[in-house]
Amino acid sequence: MRVACLWFSPPTLSDKIRHQMAGPIKLQSSNQIIGKMAEHCLRFSPQIAVRPQEAVFIEIGRCQKLYSESSFAARAQVLLRRLELRASLAFANEIPEALALAKYGAGSLVSLPLEALHEFADPFNRDFVVHPYIDKMVGSFQDLGLRTLKDFKKIPAPELSSRFGPIGLLCYQRVRGEMNLPWPRWKPEAVIREKTNFPCFEFYGEMEPLLFELKKQLDQIFQRLWARALKLQKLQVRIFCELSSQNQQPYREFIFDFLFAQSTTKTALLILKERLSRHFEKNALLTPIESLECTVLSTVPGDMTSRSLLDARDEKNEQWQSLMAQLQEAYGAENIFQAQLTEDRRPERSWKKVSRHISPTSLSNEWQGRIPLRPTHLIRPEPVEVMDGFLYLKHKSYRILQWRAANERISGGWFETAGDFNNSFDRDYYQAEIEGGVRVSLFQIREPVSVFENKECRQSEEGPIFQGAKSQFFLHGFFG
Amino acid sequence: MLKIGSRGFMASAAVQKLKLILQSQGLATFDVQVASEANLGPREFWPAPSCPEGVPRGVVVELLGTARTEWLLAFLKQNSDLQIFWAERETRILPTAIQQRGVDLGRVSFGVFAHDLLIPLRKVLQSQCFEVVVAPNVWADTKIFKAFQLFAEKSQSTLFLMGEREACASWAISLQIEIEHAHAELGEPSNPGDFSLKVLRRKYGALV
């Protein structure tokens, strides 16, 4: 086993003042800081333990093929800098040793002072009874002229047990590395939430400062998610405003259910910006913002494998997802889509909108050969009249240059409720080329013919010739 | 008269510089071999049906005529690795027809923008996700076409504007083609040779 220990010294008064002067205050206790750091360290190893308010232990012995101790130290430094934290780092074979080395900044076990026995006896700071005994024991050793653990290790074990009881023996065994310490289980917070308060930094919902703060929070959220191998699917953003007679709402809430799970701040922030800017255009904030809170509502498993440097497909796919999500946010999900074919023979229902195209199945290939060529553009069926080689549309006439007899007859849908058109699912389709070279697709509704009616229709090369009555045609689309 | 490139491609900026140098040296007539052999024409051309010169990448193209969509679909079928964004004012294009003409619908993303086409098109072009962007030509201002030209050039995407009636007079459009059906029978799939093309304007290609 190999343990890395990050020791966070308690903040000094000057640190606190500097932090307060910096601007918005993140109300975080030492425990929150330790918890956050431990969460970020999940990227290094799944086996993590914490000493409340003071230290994080990471088991790195089984990850030595992934990184060395020096590269771990470099990564930890980057992480600490990003989180604006300071900590000392030490490596050892056991938790108490790593803790003592990190706390006292010593290079080796033998140079540690006798006070380090506190860390050896109770590395997780849970046993408050043991510390007075250790203080007493350390005082006795110092009276005898012992100063370091090197001197302590030379004391015979039977003497320790007879004079200092089981606590002395426990310290002795742990200093000599003869006792394995079980790792207490540490679980990250169930809900990922970031909150920033603005006690003195007032703004009324201008987008830029708000986005600036949101970016900071999203950075934190995505790092925490990345450490857990997750992607963000649903996010709640709450903007808390000062209450006044004008503003009765304590906060404004925005729920972002992303089209594609997000893994980077850049893309998520663009989507947030779209929604917020639209919202503030219509509903300006009347009172200053007090705090900003982002909460992760749902996540999906993320891909934690390293990206290929030579293959840009993943990157391009992410760009595409980001663009589609932005456009959907701005223009509505019903207006940004991909298309997928259906089994319906009606041209207007022969496809459906999907968020993401699924590869065509064998069904569509089979279907493709059986359906006549559809027009490239479809319009809402427009009633037209076809008479004597002319097509009449909206009081204008067009000479029919070429006419193709009914090449498709579709009917059915009797079980469906009335849709856009009555009897619309009982059609004969024709194609025609009218003057100007425009090729159009028309359908004729077949009405039930009474035996008393004499409605005859025969085809000719110039087009259908109707005798006795006009036939009901609809223009449904055009080619090209 | 100066001719650049054995295949008739227009000179790029680098070739233009070379041209000026040659002109200043009085060697303007020798640059044909220089441009073609040095392969200085950086603009990529995609093969297109009934258009031996091809369609340049990273430009604005206006398509006119009664067979423009059919021709475009034949072009997209021919270039089967291109990603396409199809923008419209209202949903008119029939995806079933696109699939029937041999274009995989997985490559096509659709956008319906009833009011403003400019901003979404700018976003789409700037995203560099699509090699081909199709949109109706609803503008007349040259500034807009110039902006599109710059975006298209930067993203190396070709913007196909579907003109309705007359060819747009803006100089920022690099290629204008009027396409009609040649002799295809009604209801028959169009073949590459079934189009009658009339090039109204062409930059980055043979001089017309």
Image (cartoon, rainbow, N blue to C red):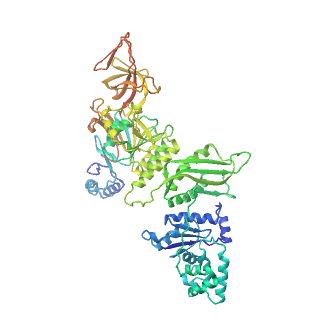
Viewed as shown, does residue A429 lie left or right of A354? left
Visible residue check, residue A51: yes
Is A46 situated left or right of A244 in this image?
left
- The residue positioned 39% from the left and 50% from the top of the image is B156
Residue A117, above or below A200:
below
Judging depth in this view, the residue of B130 and A95 nearest the camera is: A95
Quick one: A10 or B106, which is closer to the camera?
Answer: A10
How many marks the image carries: the answer is: 0
Question: Which residue sits furthest top?
Answer: A452
Question: Residue B17's spot in the image, x, y percent?
Answer: 35, 56
Query: Which residue lies most toward the right here?
Result: A245
Question: Taking A303 as reference, is A479 above or below it?
Answer: above
The residue depicted at 66 percent of the width and 80 percent of the height is A135
Q: Position of residue B15 (x, y in %)?
A: 33, 55
The quarter of the image holding the C terminus of chain B is: top left
The x, y position of residue A177, in whole percent, is 52, 79
Is residue B178 visible in this depiction of the protein?
no
* Viewer-proximal residue among A214 and A263: A263
Q: Quadrant of residue A392?
A: top left
Q: Tell me where residue A405 sits by quadrant.
A: top left
Q: Position of residue A147 (x, y in %)?
A: 61, 87
Q: Nearer the viewer, residue A70 or B27?
A: A70
